[in-house]
Image (cartoon, helix red, strand yellow):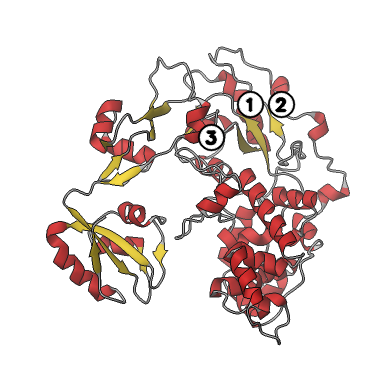
Amino acid sequence: MPVAAAPPASAPAVAAALPDTAASVPALNAPDNTAPPIPPEAADPLRPETRVDFDDPATRIDLWSRLRANYSIAPLTGPRVRKWEQYYAGRPDYVARMTERGGRYLYHIAEELQKRNMPMDLALLPFIESAFNPQAMSVARAAGMWQFMPATGRVFALKQNAFRDDRRDVLASTRAALDYLERLGAMFNGDWHLALAAYNWGEGNVRRALQRKRDKKAATVYESLRGMPLETRDYVPKLQAVKNIVANPEGYGLTLPPLENHPYFLSVSIERDIDVELAAKLAGMPLEEFQYLNPQMNRPVIFAAGTPQVLLPYDNANAFVRNLPRHDGPLATWTVWVAPRTLRLAEVAELVDMSEAELRDVNRIPPSMLVRAGSALVVPRPEETLHDVPEHLAENGTLTLASETRGLRRVSFRAGRRGDSVAAIAKRYRVSAELVAHWNRVGVNGKFRRGQNIVVMVPAKTRNTARSKLAGTANKPAMAHKR
């Protein structure tokens, strides 16, 4: 899918109009969808004062030039930096994918950093966190392009419920990441190497490392710390390698895509519930591209009470605003149903008139699960329903599952020396990868670290067989426990 780094020069782009740097566009939708077509000139969502002046030299400069001209974190040198320079230089296709993807978000991040007077180097941090993939999910359940853990996300007001995960939201996660980095920068007295180590390893770990005996020959305080995990020891060198490549891509045999110094997207208000596919269609863009800008949605519908805006490129924002009031038919074909008691999936499917397979697919539920009382599920919206999902559900709806454990026994063991993938464990014990991921609270495509505890549920009658299998793959004898 081709990705433009910015709106074409023939179409005016928009400047930041709100605190989050995304220009706000009101949605022109009436609840009954009976509004007459709006003339194109009236549907233009852009106010004259928000247009970019393409004669302004600041607009014409390349965004890469703006970033490299404003580096302010002390440079790092040494073999670890060279190792990562060579790593990226040897993977030009990977770098191309990262930089093309990052082009959607870099201007917004740069603007936010400038507002806060923070180092522009930090705009490149998502390259090493997630390769600028806002849909990224780690084995440890860190999510989004800034890779927030669930608990840390909640500390920084990133909502995580059945319908959306703001750790993947482009605006919300960037705000939270810069809030956290700003706090860490102050905590470590402007030593951004330490602040970055704390972002990766945790501020408590870095503080304790500072109190322990350190390497007196190290060039920086960061490099003097002992006891850092390998990931953290490589963290700042990785960022330095990316900075060096951005500063001189030709020197590494790489080419960066052109990025213009103006917004890639603007925000468009959502006033009624609307299906994700329909929103993308009205905006005239592929669903995949819509989801790259709005990856926080967990379900195929956007609930206006919880998600009052979406991000769209300039031309697509105009198309959405013009097409929305002309749409003939329902905007949302999904609504929320709350389980009155703990139920099996087959029972829920019968109550809401869905197939069990569709119910599982829409709500991302593994097989052999119980839906606990009070869980909020997305189900078909009856045609006669006039009201959208209320705010208390859109903001606080949760889905709580429990394994159907009748006739099963819980078995735990540790990952082997090379680690084990979720898929490999699922194949070995003839269960779904979704179940293994659910039992261990990891991503379905994840991999367990060496020595990490793994849980599977096996039929009770095959306990001895399971124990022998596990013993052959674990570092220590398998142990069986009741849940």
Residue at 76% x, 67% y is: 73
Return the disc, 3 or 2, that comes first in the chain's sequence: 2
In percent of width and height, residue 41 lies at: 73, 22
Tag 3 secondary structure:
helix
**Residue 399, located in which quarter of the rendered image?**
top left
Q: Is residue 244 left or right of residue 272?
A: right
In percent of width and height, residue 255 lies at: 67, 65
Tag 1 secondary structure:
helix
Q: Quadrant of the C terminus?
A: bottom left
Tag 2 secondary structure:
loop
Callout 1 crowding tier (Cα within 10 Å): few <14, some 14–19, many ≥20: many
Q: Is residue 353 left or right of residue 380?
A: left
- Comparing 376 with 84, the one in front is 376
Q: Which residue is mark 1?
A: 321
Q: Which residue is mark 3?
A: 280
Callout 3 crowding tier (Cα within 10 Å): few <14, some 14–19, many ≥20: some
Residue at 61% x, 72% y is: 208
Return the residue found at the far front: 211
Label 1 and label 3: CA atoms lie apart by: 12 Å
In percent of width and height, residue 382 lies at: 38, 20
Do the residues under discs 1 and 2 have CB atoms within 8 angstroms? yes
Residue type for callout 3? Ala
Compared with 318, 365 (above or below) is below
Label 1 and label 2: CA atoms lie apart by: 8 Å
Residue type for callout 1? Val
Residue type for callout 2? Asp
Residue at 38% x, 75% y is: 418
Return the residue found at the far left: 461
Q: Is residue 385 left or right of residue 346?
A: right
Compared with 344, 66 (above or below) is below
Numbered tag placed on residue 44 in the rendering: 2
